[in-house]
């Protein structure tokens, strides 16, 4: 039994197969009180009214809105609001809930930030139900409060949000939950439980302990989610797991921040020109062509990207004025191919950035590209969990006292893990250099490296549930000089490059924020170096 199983024995009564029975939707827990909400948009300019759309089985409900961060601030409260049971179509995850607005919230004078809506109701027996939602308030004059702007990874949030039973990994077919991904998702629905708020003790996607010999993979976060009526995808994406932890650390350490969403990059590209630095944190897997255009133009004009995230992989499209996200991923999808294949718009086909007909490698924008998994189930389970330093003289490592070959952020911190970004490279005179594949910029500097793999090998002949793509090496040993991609051996990296008048720092790991949450000296100092060099104002 693993340490995780000893700490949480009840969680491991579940198997991964049980996840198909979870569908957060009106009536999902028979007879229980319920409440959910969403807003018409994910972000609002300060002063704009926010329309809150609430479904509840309670006669009345209460609502509280907090600006979340290091010191949460309550900005709005209302009790005894009349509750309404809103009609919800079975395919709400695809077409939207269509709920009517319950009331509006004025945002005049609110600071830029992420605002969490806390909802509660009780049934006639006194049983309580709670729910939550979030929205972003943007500065009316971008850059007037801070020249640092946190850009929430909302395209990835949407891809993993399984409220209503569907996301870009699963779907409801003929009333049955399946592992067939859904290519079309509505943003007009609540966030699944765990994306906005988490209780203390919810397991992270990367566990601190290193497995013993002959251990079998387990996933404490999945068992916990099922045992506690949360989405099994809560650690894959969302404010609660990623950006919130960064913002708490940054505000505690004196950084003043402004906020936006990835969707704002496409819908309001002009609003980013006054920032010096855009900050991207956490699981950052899905982008649209237009989002990348905004970031590339921002860097070319002299802006900087501080990316403390990983897994830059898929192109998406926004449709219906940003209310719908599309990602087919494959031409063999049961619903048919992406309709843009073979058209004049086929550069917007929703597949991996590196593949035809898109042919826009992710590394051209971020320096690195998606390179698989580490410290996740059977993928590199006993790797250090940290990075090995190769260029300690780089400014990103100032005041860290790191030396060539040092490893930092290792277990139990594990700031390198889950899904990561890297690049193809060669070692020359002891230093890694990009090969130029994967669209890597010629001036890309690889500052630190760590191993990763494209999935989990099956050493248990199908008797153990795995939670990542199955990857097995070939039967024959790899010959010296062979193409290692054949066995899916990859890397993660920390990288820096300059483009136009600006530059990009990329930490290449979804879980960099673990180092900040652990208050690890090295993670914190590197983060400070990047933010300070890129122009952050401090309080």
Image (spheres, helix red, strand yellow):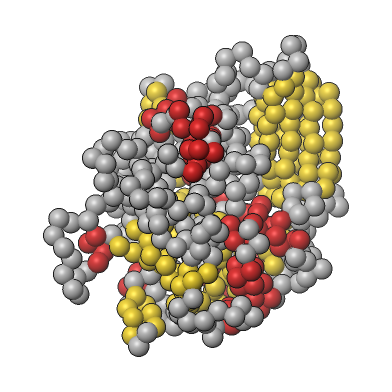
In the displayed structure image, the side of residue 17 where residue 302 appears, left or right:
right
Q: Along the line of sight, which residue is nearer the eye, 93 or 177?
A: 177
Does residue 303 appear to the left or right of 138 in the view shown?
Answer: left
Q: Is residue 396 above or below residue 98?
A: below
Q: Viewed as shown, does residue 241 lie left or right of 57? A: left
Q: Is residue 362 above or below residue 462?
A: below
Residue 58: image location, x then y, percent: 73, 18
Q: Quadrant of the C terminus?
A: bottom right
Image x and y of residue 129, in percent: 69, 24
Along the line of sight, the residue nearer the viewer: 170 or 426: 426
Q: Position of residue 525 (x, y in %)?
A: 64, 72
Q: Residue furthest bottom?
A: 429
User: What residue is at 24 percent from the left and 52 percent from the top?
Assistant: 472
Say which quadrant the N terminus sits in.
top left
Q: Position of residue 178 (x, y in %)?
A: 37, 30
Of residues 143 and 524, the one nearer the viewer is 524
- Residue displayed at 72% across by 17% down: 127
Q: Residue at x 42, y 67 (%)?
A: 450
């Amino acid at each position: 039994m693993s340490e995780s199983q000893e700490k949480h024995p009840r969680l491991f009564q579940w198997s991964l197969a049980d996840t198909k029975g979870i569908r957060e939707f009106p009536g999902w827990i028979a007879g229980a009180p319920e409440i959910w909400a969403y807003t018409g948009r994910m972000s609002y300019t300060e002063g704009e009214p926010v329309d809150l759309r609430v479904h509840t089985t309670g006669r009345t409900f209460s609502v509280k809105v907090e600006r979340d961060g290091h010191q949460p601030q309550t900005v709005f409260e209302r009790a005894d609001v009349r509750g309404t049971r809103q009609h919800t179509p079975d395919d709400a995850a695809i077409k939207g809930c269509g709920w009517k607005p319950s009331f509006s919230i004025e945002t005049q004078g609110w600071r830029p930030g992420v605002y969490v809506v806390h909802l509660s109701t009780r049934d006639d027996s006194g049983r309580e139900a709670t729910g939550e939602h979030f929205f972003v308030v943007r500065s009316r004059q971008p850059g007037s409060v801070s020249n640092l702007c946190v850009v929430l990874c909302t395209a990835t949030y949407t891809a993993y949000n399984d409220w209503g039973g569907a996301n870009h990994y699963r779907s409801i077919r003929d009333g049955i939950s399946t592992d067939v991904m859904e290519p079309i998702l509505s943003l007009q629905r609540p966030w699944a439980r765990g994306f906005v708020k988490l209780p203390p003790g919810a397991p992270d996607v990367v566990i601190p302990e290193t497995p013993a010999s002959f251990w079998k993979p387990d996933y404490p976060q999945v068992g916990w989610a099922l045992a506690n009526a949360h989405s099994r995808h809560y650690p894959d994406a969302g404010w609660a797991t990623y950006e919130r932890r960064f913002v708490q650390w940054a505000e505690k350490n004196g950084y003043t921040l402004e906020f936006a969403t990835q969707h704002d990059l496409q819908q309001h590209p002009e609003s980013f020109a006054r920032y010096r630095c855009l900050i991207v944190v956490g699981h950052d897997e899905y982008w649209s062509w237009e989002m990348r255009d905004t970031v590339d133009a921002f860097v070319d004009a002299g802006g900087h990207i501080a990316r403390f995230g990983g897994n830059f992989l898929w192109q998406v499209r926004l449709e219906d004025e940003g209310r719908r996200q599309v990602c087919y991923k494959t031409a063999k999808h049961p619903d048919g191919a992406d309709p843009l294949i073979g058209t004049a718009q086929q550069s917007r086909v929703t597949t991996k950035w590196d593949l035809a007909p898109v042919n826009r490698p992710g590394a051209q924008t971020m320096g690195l590209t998606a390179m698989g998994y580490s410290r996740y189930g059977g993928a590199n389970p006993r790797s250090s969990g940290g990075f090995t330093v190769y260029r300690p003289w780089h400014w990103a490592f100032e005041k860290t006292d790191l030396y060539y070959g040092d490893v930092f952020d290792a277990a139990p911190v594990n700031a390198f893990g889950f899904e990561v970004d890297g690049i193809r490279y060669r070692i020359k005179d002891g230093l890694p250099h990009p090969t130029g594949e994967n669209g890597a910029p010629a001036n890309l500097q690889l500052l630190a490296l760590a191993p990763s793999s494209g999935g989990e090998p099956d050493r248990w002949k199908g008797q153990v549930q795995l939670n990542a793509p199955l990857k097995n090496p070939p039967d024959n040993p790899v010959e010296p000089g062979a193409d290692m991609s054949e066995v899916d051996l990859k890397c993660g990296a920390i990288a820096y490059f300059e483009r136009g008048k600006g530059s990009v720092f990329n930490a290449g790991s979804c879980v960099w924020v673990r180092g900040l949450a652990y208050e690890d000296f090295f993670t914190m100092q590197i983060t400070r170096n990047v933010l300070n060099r890129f122009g952050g104002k401090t309080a």
